[in-house]
Amino acid sequence: MKPIRTAVFPVAGLGTRFLPATKVVPKEMLPIVDKPLIQYAVDEAIEAGIEHMVFVTGRGKDIIEDHFDIAYELQHTMEVRGKDVSILDGTRLKPGKSTFTRQQEPLGLGHAIWCARDVVGDDPFAILLPDEFMHGSPGCMKQMAAAYERLGGNLVCALEIPMEKTSSYGVIDPGKRDGAITEVKGLVEKPAPGTAPSNLILPGRYILQPEVMKILETQEAGAGGEIQLTDAMAQMIGKQPFHGVTFDGRRFDCGSKTGYIEANLALALDRAEMRDGIREMALRLLNE
Ligand code: G1P
């Protein structure tokens, strides 16, 4: 079986839910404590053994490319001042191991992924949606890569949420369940309230076979008038193995303000040097 070497990060979204913060700064660059969301996603991919990072960007997203480049002036100045530059380790992607391509029009997640087709080529690949922050050890993609070694085919991360929230997500029609693995019998994007086949949603982590690109090529617009990745994946069910993997870890929906603030609080509480101060501050604020 071919290992997963390439990850696609769709980062072309306008981030309107975080305006005015995201007027100039891409939402993927918003920090959780002190590291931008996009870097958590890249670190997660690297941990899973993925080597090549493909960013599907859009206008105004150039600083994402700068973030993963060398910052010679900053590094030099820090070194002259005797400051530790190791904090920047991990922000530089390996030479020749990243690609930035633009989705020129906001035609949907499926279209964004299709924009990476030439880079992905004929190999299976991963997709990580950076505003879905998956926090755990091992990371979500590493857990999925381990499942992929056993199962092959196509894998999506599967997450249980309250039924009444399913209409905002891609939803799984589940078959047999064996531990963390659920057979996927069907997929539906943003089902109307009351019609979801289950409360198992897609929280933005995928390992897919390259055939999905061919399907996306002719994919019609679906939910919300957008070309949906979920619709293209649904067409592969029955033709190739398709499973859901339940992530053993914590998920924060950083596409929402509440989820974003929760992620910041949770990660700050995880830091030994911040824990007591944050706890005290949170209790004080709650009592005000
Ligand atoms: C996208 C996908 C959806 C998935 C969600 C996860 O929706 O289309 O299937 O469940 O991300 O956050 P969006 O949030 O872009 O509307």
Image (spheres, rainbow, N blue to C red):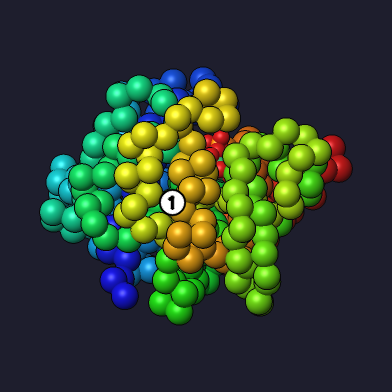
Quarter placement of the C terminus:
top right
Residue type at tag 1: Leu
Q: Residue at x 73, y 44 (%)?
A: 196
Task: Give 282 or 112, whichever is nearer the viewer.
Answer: 112
Position in image of residue 158 (x %, y %) = 61, 59
Drawn side of residue 136 relative to residue 281, left or right: left
Residue 159 percent across, percent down from the top left: 65, 57
Mark 1 CB lies closer than 8 A to ligand 1: no
Which of 288 and 12 lies nearest the eye of the viewer?
12
Residue at 24% x, 36% y: name it. 101
How many badges with numbers are in the image? 1
Give the residue displayed 51% in from the left and 41% down from the top: 231
Residue at numbered disc 1: 128
Q: Nearer the viewer, residue 258 or 151?
A: 151
Q: Relative to 200, is 2 above or below?
A: below
Question: Which residue sits at x=46%, y=53%?
Answer: 236
The quarter of the rendered structure image containing the N terminus is bottom left
Q: Quadrant of residue 153?
A: bottom left
Residue 190's place in the image compared with 130, above or below, is above
Viewer-side residue, 266 vs 77:
266
Give the x, y percent position of residue 223: 57, 30
Q: Quadrant of ligand 1?
A: top right
Q: Position of residue 13 (x, y in %)?
A: 43, 30
Identify whether 248 is placed above or below 22.
below
Is residue 221 toward the left or the right of residue 247 in the image? Answer: left
Residue 173 visible at all: yes
Kindly give the residue lying farthest to the front in the view shown.
239
Confirm whether residue 64 shows in the render.
Answer: no
Residue 66, picture quadrant: top left
Q: Residues within 10 Å of mark 1 (few under 14, many from 20)?
A: many
Element class at badge 1: strand
